[in-house]
Each structure stands twice: as C-alpha cells, then as structure tokens.
C-alpha cells in the first residue's frame, strides 16, 4: 500500500499535528465545499497525479490542462468517493489515468505523442528529506515487485498503463497473438497485487 | 467478440479497452461480483505504479486549480438514481428527468468568490437536510437498483430486465457485429456497432458533451436513396450506449444531429457525426 492509505480514515483526527490529515478526510471536507481542505489535498497528491498524466500524455502543456481537469473532476465528485472500494489515492489516480488516456487517444494529442519524454522532464521536487526517503522506498518496493513479472507481462503492463495503449495495440507492438495481451496484462497485475500485498 | 469476458478485467483496470469493449465489460461487471472485486484489487495494484512517475506540476497550476474549483459546486452524494447527472463517468441509461430543481440552484455566484463562514455553514446545513431527503428515496429505490463501484466510482445501474439494455448487449456481442467509428469535436468519440443478423445498430459514445440548452441529440439512419429516418433521441454527456430504433440491416449510414427539444422529423442541422456503413 502507499504511504497515503496506511493512515486510518474513519475518525476525525486533530488537525495541525505533524501527522498528515488522511486523504479520505480531506475528500469528505472538500465535498462540503471546503476549499482549504482541497488545497491541502492538492499539495498531498498533485505530484502523483501530474506525474502519471505527464507520463501518459507527454506533452507538458496538455498534461497541465488534463491535470487541471482531473482536479476539477475530483472536486465535483468528492461526495461520491466510496472508501469501501479502495483508497482515496487510487480513486484519484483512476480519474487521472482515464482522462490522460482519453486525451492521448484523441486526434489532437496524437500529433505530439512521439516527442521525446525526456526533453521536457522536470525533476521531482520534495518538500522534505524525510518525504523523499519515503518516496524512494516506495519506488524501490514497486521496482522490486515489477521484477517478479515476466518480461512480457511487464512490457504489456507498462505499455498499457504508463503509455496508454489498448490491449490490441499492445499485442501488435509486442508481436503477441491477438487476444493474449489482455491476459498478460491481467496476469502481470495479479502478480503485482499479490507481491505488493495490496488490500482494499 | 465472444471471448471470455472475465479475462478483460486487467485491461479494464488499466484503461486498455477501446470504447466498445469498455461498454461491454461494464455491463458485464454490473452482474459479476467476482469481476468487481478483482477489478478493485487490480486498480489498486496499477495505481502503485504511479510512484515511479512522480513529478511536481508547475507551481502556477495550483492557483489555476484552486481558482477554478471556487466557481463550481461539488455534486451531491450519489444516493438514488434520480440524482444521477448526465455527465457521470459511466452511465448507460438516460438519466431520469425528475428532481432537477434542487440540484440546479447554484449555491454561490460565479463572480464573488469571497467566502463567509456563516454562508458556508448555511450551505452545509441545507446540504445535510437534502441528504436526509435523499436517504429516504434510497429505501424506495433499493428494490430495483444495485450499486456498482469500480475503483471507487459508484454507479447506479438498473439490473432488472431492461429490454433495450439486453438488446444492446446482444448487438455488441453478435458474431457479425461490425464497428464504424467517428470522432466528434473536443476529442469525444462515437462508435456505431451494427449487426445485420439482428437488424440493429447501437451507438457507443465516450466523452460526449451535453447538447446546448433547449436542444437534444437525435440519431438518424440513412437509406440507399440518402433519405434520413429518425432513430430516436439520445442523452448527451459522458459515456452512453443507445440502441438506434428501427431496422438498420439495410441502412447505408448513421448520424447524430443537434435538434430542437423533442426532436425533428428530418435533420435540420448538419450532423455532428456521421458514419457510412461501407
């Protein structure tokens, strides 16, 4: 699980303490129109959401546009987040991913698609050293989990999730028989889920 | 299109299905708790990958986001099918036209973004009162409606035997189903799926806007002489799956136009999308 979802979400914990306010609670407050809570939410997740969107969309200006749409959608739908179905961060990432994929599959985006990703790469900025360490550990954990996948599972999953291709496109790109890429993606995700010990 | 549909759960969890496959799988999800549970877990697993792509957005984005949300009211909780708004991420049936009044009244003016504490608490009070009213409606509605949640999205679906839904499913899964795609302004897509053996066509849309105020989207089938016959109205907003009325087996094309409320006998505007069944 990510560091966000290990924080219990049920009770109203005192604010202003060193412990960050759980994302679930910030979402609940946002649903009542609390803009301060939403600003706090933005600060907590904007790097995760923007980073994912930019990885899929690649064009920096469009990535920014999509990320803005994502936050508007999170704000509008905050009352509809259902904590019994998963962590708040996963819910927000789902919205971000879907919007990024929709954008990249639209005709306008395809023009910019093949421009170099590295050219516009911005370094991750960290607020504190402690946070940077936690993030690096998270990343290492995910890297190790990915190493347990077969090369084809890993490639299929990365092309689908991080590059936004359909399973049919992935099959063509990896020279797999039509219909097997979706199985590789599913098998890879299941292994990732089990290795990371993801629970809902 | 008759492969084991359960196997699509992974591709669905990472948005690797095309619009038609996604529509089909979401229909399957409505009746398959095992797939729903699996999808939730796979979505959570996939979202862990985003730790590898973290990147801080430009500092200017924060102010833009916060300025924008200040002008928009969050949607009410989704507690009854009446409350479903047309632009939800996943909808499959036309939203019921009832209950718009309470939702439509804007709680804040767009011009004045200044906030007072008592204004806010007043809004909270009225919100919780409306929440109670909705809670009551839930009890009434619960008999015919099931909640489906995917990755935290909660979607209301009619799971009783809706003949048009069943027909759409048959067309989408028909062995002779043929797809024709069209792209709409603003990046939305429309795919017409036709089965000649079933004599029916279904339209699957993704990311479609709402029609202008006072207007509707109307569907058309074109015959060999170029004549357009109305195939019914369709809701706008988000993702839709709608069966075109009429026999589509001999049609040469299908289109969508924007028409005055209630629809027209003949198209009065140029189609916003048209596909030829070539």
Image (cartoon, coloured by chain):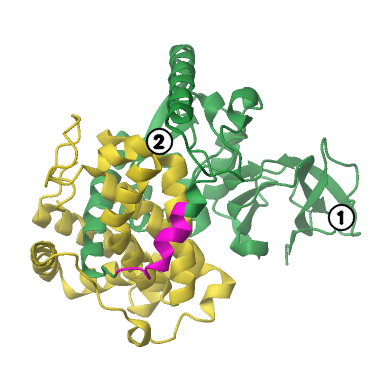
The reply to whether residue B183 is visible in this rendering is no
User: How many callouts does the rendering have?
Assistant: 2
Residue on which the image places disc 1: B269
Cα distance, mark 2 to mark 1? Answer: 40 Å
Chain B painted colour: green
Q: Residue B100, how many percent across, how many down?
A: 63, 27
Q: Can you tell which of label 2 and label 1 is closer to the viewer?
A: 2
Please state if B147 lies on the left or on the right of A131 as rendered: right
Per the rendered image, the range of residues in magenta is B56-66
Q: Residue A13, how many percent across, how many down?
A: 16, 33
| Magenta segment includes B63 | yes
Q: Residue at x 54, y 42 (%)?
A: B169
Q: Residue at x 43, y 45 (%)?
A: A75
Secondary structure mostly taken by the magenta-highlighted segment of the chain = helix
Q: Residue at x 72, y 47 (%)?
A: B211
In the image, residue A30 sits, relative to residue B69, either above or below, namely above
- Chain given the colour yellow: A
- Quarter of the image where one finds residue B231: top right
Labelled disc at residue B17 = none
| Magenta segment includes B165 | no
Residue on which the image places disc 2: A31
Residues B223 and B216: in front is B216
Quadrant holding the C terminus of chain A: top left
Q: Residue A15, how many percent across, how many down?
A: 19, 38
Please state if A113 lies on the left or on the right of A83 as rendered: right
In the image, residue A197 sits, relative to residue A81, either above or below, namely below
């Amino acid at each position: 699980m990510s560091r966000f979802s290990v924080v219990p979400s049920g009770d109203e914990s005192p604010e202003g303490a060193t412990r960050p306010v759980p994302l679930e609670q910030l979402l609940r407050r946002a649903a009542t129109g609390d803009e301060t809570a939403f600003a706090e939410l933005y600060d907590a997740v904007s790097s995760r959401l923007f980073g994912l969107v930019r990885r899929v969309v690649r064009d920096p200006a469009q990535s920014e546009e999509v990320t803005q749409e994502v936050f508007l959608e999170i704000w509008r739908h905050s009352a509809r987040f259902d904590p019994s179905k998963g962590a708040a961060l996963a819910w927000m990432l789902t919205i971000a991913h879907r919007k990024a994929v929709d954008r990249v599959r639209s005709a306008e985006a395809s023009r910019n698609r093949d421009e170099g990703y590295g050219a516009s790469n911005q370094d991750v900025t960290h607020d504190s050293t402690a946070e940077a360490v936690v993030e690096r550990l998270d990343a290492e954990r995910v890297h190790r989990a990915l190493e347990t996948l077969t090369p084809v599972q890993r490639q299929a999953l990365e092309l689908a999730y991080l590059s936004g291709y359909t399973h049919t496109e992935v099959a063509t790109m990896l020279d797999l028989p039509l219909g097997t890429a979706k199985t590789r993606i599913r098998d890879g995700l299941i292994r990732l889920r089990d290795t990371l010990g993801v629970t809902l | 299109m008759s492969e084991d549909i359960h196997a699509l759960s992974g591709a669905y969890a990472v948005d690797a299905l095309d619009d038609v496959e996604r529509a089909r799988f979401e229909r399957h999800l409505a009746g398959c708790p095992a797939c729903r549970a699996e999808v939730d877990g796979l979505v959570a697993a996939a979202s862990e990958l985003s730790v590898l792509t973290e990147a801080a957005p430009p500092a200017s984005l924060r102010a833009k986001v916060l300025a924008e949300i200040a002008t928009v009211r969050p949607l009410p909780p989704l507690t009854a099918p009446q409350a479903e708004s047309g632009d939800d991420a996943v909808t499959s049936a036309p939203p019921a036209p009832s209950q718009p009044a309470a939702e439509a009244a804007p709680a804040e003016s767009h011009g004045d973004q200044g906030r007072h504490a008592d204004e806010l608490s007043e809004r909270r009070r009225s919100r919780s009162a409306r929440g109670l009213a909705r809670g009551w409606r839930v009890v009434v509605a619960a008999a015919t409606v099931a909640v489906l949640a995917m990755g935290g999205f909660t979607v209301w679906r009619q799971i009783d035997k809706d003949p048009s839904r069943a027909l759409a499913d048959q067309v989408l899964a028909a062995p002779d189903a043929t797809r024709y795609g069209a792209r709409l302004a603003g990046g939305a897509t429309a795919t017409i799926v036709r089965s000649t053996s079933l004599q029916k066509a279904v339209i699957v849309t993704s990311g479609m806007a709402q029609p202008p105020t006072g207007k509707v989207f109307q569907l058309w089938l074109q015959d060999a002489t170029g004549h357009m016959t109305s195939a019914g109205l369709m809701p706008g907003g988000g993702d839709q799956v709608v069966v075109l009325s009429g026999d589509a087996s001999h049609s040469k094309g299908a289109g969508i136009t924007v028409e005055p409320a209630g629809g027209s006998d003949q198209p009065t505007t140029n189609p916003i999308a048209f596909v030829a069944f070539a």
